[in-house]
Image (cartoon, rainbow, N blue to C red):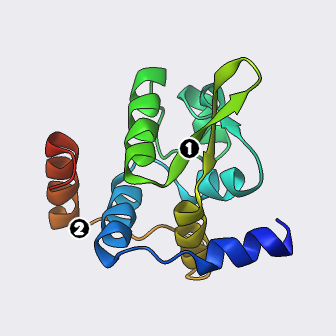
């Protein structure tokens, strides 16, 4: 990341509720911090996240079907943490972090390199947010 990108990422101020929702979604996701750390520097394609490949790379705790992985990634896109990669022919199956995602990953990498475990209320509120799409 260049100095200009670092400056732009750090200068973006998000509303508290946006950050809280994003943190909760990240904690409740089936992914490990290693996946998001990889997304900081490169696009990560879906087939490296799903199945046994995701476990080998320490992207997931347990094997996920391609559909389950994609649904979880799409939720993180809606929350504002990820974006889909685009090439000259359209959308690809690769994912990268947004500036908000970078801020949260950098924060948690500084706190021991693991995502905090979600509480029961985190899981409940995240499920309701997914169901009703941001209440």
The quarter of the rendered structure image containing the N terminus is bottom right
Q: Residues within 10 Å of mark 1 (few under 14, many from 20)?
A: some
Residue highlighted by disc 1: 83
Residue highlighted by disc 2: 119
What residue is shown at x 48% (from left), y 23% (from top)? Answer: 66
Q: Distance between the residues labelled 2 and 1?
A: 26 Å
Q: Is 18 above or below relative to 29?
A: below
Compare residues 56 and 100 and report the one nearer the observer: 100
Q: Is 2 above or below relative to 71?
A: below
Q: In this view, does 25 lie to the left or right of 52?
A: left
Q: Is residue 29 left or right of residue 120?
A: right
The quarter of the rendered structure image containing the C terminus is bottom left
Q: Can residue 117 be seen in this view?
A: no
| Displayed quadrant of residue 34 | bottom right
Q: In this view, does 87 lie to the left or right of 3?
A: left
The secondary structure type at the circle numbered 2 is: loop
Q: Which mark is residue 135?
A: none
The secondary structure type at the circle numbered 1 is: strand
């Amino acid at each position: 990341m260049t100095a200009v990108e670092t400056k732009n990422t750090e200068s973006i101020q998000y509303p508290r509720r946006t950050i809280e929702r994003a943190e909760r979604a990240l904690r409740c996701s089936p992914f490990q911090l290693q996946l998001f750390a990889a997304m900081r520097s490169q696009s990560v394609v879906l087939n490296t996240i799903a199945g046994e490949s995701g476990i080998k790379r320490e992207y997931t705790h347990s094997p996920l079907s391609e559909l389950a992985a994609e649904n979880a990634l799409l939720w993180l896109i809606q929350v504002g943490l990820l974006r889909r990669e685009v090439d000259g022919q359209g959308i690809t199956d690769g994912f990268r972090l947004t500036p908000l995602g970078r801020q949260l990953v950098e924060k948690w990498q500084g706190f021991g390199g693991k995502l905090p475990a979600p509480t029961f209320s985190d899981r409940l509120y995240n499920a309701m947010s997914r169901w009703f799409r941001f209440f």
